[in-house]
Image (cartoon, rainbow, N blue to C red):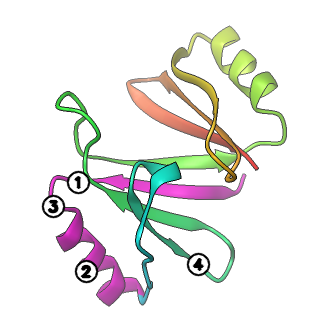
Amino acid sequence: MTVHYLEIVSNDADAVTGLYERLHGLSFGPPDRDLGHARVAARADGTLVGIRKPLAAHEQPIMRTYLAVEDIQRAVKKAEDSGAIIAYPPTRQGERGTFAIVIQGDVQHGLWQR
């Protein structure tokens, strides 16, 4: 199990970005359209960390981990067969790959195929 993308949604994205810069020594780029205008930093191991504001009034602050999968269609089908709710079906995200979000046990689980 490998973390591909750690997404942090906050009403005060600038403050959280500053915290992660100071706390973890990350260097964030400009807002990335492909990732909801998140400012993204790449860790030495290739893991991406993105911090952004909510995209809609109903979106709540959250820290969501996207785990890398080899076949996102198969992974989503397995999750659904296990009783998970498909909150966001596999969706191409620009040049960065395809993501999906499933909910099980009241937790949002992100999946990402590069």
Lower sequence index among marks 3 and 4: 3
Q: Are marks 3 and 4 in contact (CB under 8 Å)?
A: no
User: Is 19 in the magenta?
Assistant: yes
Q: CA distance from mark 1 to mark 4?
A: 20 Å
In this figure, which residue is indicated by the disc labeled 2? 18
**Quick check: marks 3 and 1 in contact, CB under 8 Å?**
yes
- The residue that appears at 69% across and 52% down in the rendered structure is 95
What amino acid is found at the position of numbered circle 4 in the picture?
Arg
Up-down relation of residue 68 to residue 48 (above or below): above
Which residue was labeled with disc 4?
Answer: 43
Q: Which residue is mark 3?
A: 12
Q: Which residues are magenta?
A: 1-24
Per the model, the C-alpha gap separating discs 3 and 1 is 5 Å
Q: Amino acid at mark 3?
A: Asp
Whether 1 is drawn above or below 55: the answer is: below
Give the label on residue 41, or none: none
Distance, label 2 to label 1, CA atoms, is: 12 Å
Name the residue: 81% across, 23% down. Answer: 74
